Image (cartoon, helix red, strand yellow):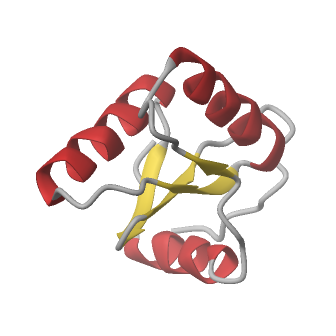
């Protein structure tokens, strides 16, 4: 699913007041963390994930791995926070037309 700039801006606006739902710990990206992200995406559709890492390359690799594993869309990445969206069967968020 590809989103237009208008749709991405809409999702960024919705994500702004949200708090991170999942935060990676010292163990990094584990199966349990991925399962929690999957559950949160299924329930909320639009979530924030906090990736605390001082190394920019490592942080980017982790964020790319999360997006790849969950097959979600990266809406935005600011600092340590990744905003991601994946539409569920129930469609809780109605995205404007292109």
Farthest top residue? 31
Based on the displayed image, in which of its 4 quarters is residue 89 positioned? top right
Front residue (pair 60, 13)? 60
| Relative to 32, residue 36 above or below | below
> Horizontal and vertical percent for residue 20?
65, 62
> Horizontal and vertical percent for residue 35?
65, 22
Left or right: 38 with respect to 77? Answer: right
Left or right: 65 with respect to 57? Answer: right
- Residue ID at (40%, 65%): 80
> Horizontal and vertical percent for residue 93?
78, 59
Based on the displayed image, in which of its 4 quarters is residue 17 positioned? bottom right
Based on the displayed image, in which of its 4 quarters is residue 47 positioned? bottom right
Front residue (pair 81, 1)? 81
| Relative to 19, residue 31 above or below | above
Q: Quadrant of the N terminus?
A: top left
- Residue ID at (40%, 49%): 2
Front residue (pair 14, 22)? 22
- Residue ID at (67%, 42%): 87
Left or right: 31 with respect to 39? Answer: left
């Amino acid at each position: 699913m590809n989103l237009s700039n208008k749709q991405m801006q809409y999702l960024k606006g919705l994500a702004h007041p949200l708090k991170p739902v999942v935060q990676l710990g010292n163990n990094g990206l584990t199966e349990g963390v991925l399962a929690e992200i999957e559950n949160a995406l299924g329930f909320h559709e639009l979530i924030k994930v906090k990736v605390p890492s001082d190394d920019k390359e490592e942080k980017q690799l982790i964020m790319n791995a999360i997006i790849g594993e969950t097959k979600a869309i990266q809406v935005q990445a600011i600092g340590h926070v990744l905003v991601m969206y994946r539409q569920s069967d129930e469609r809780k968020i109605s995205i404007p037309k292109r």
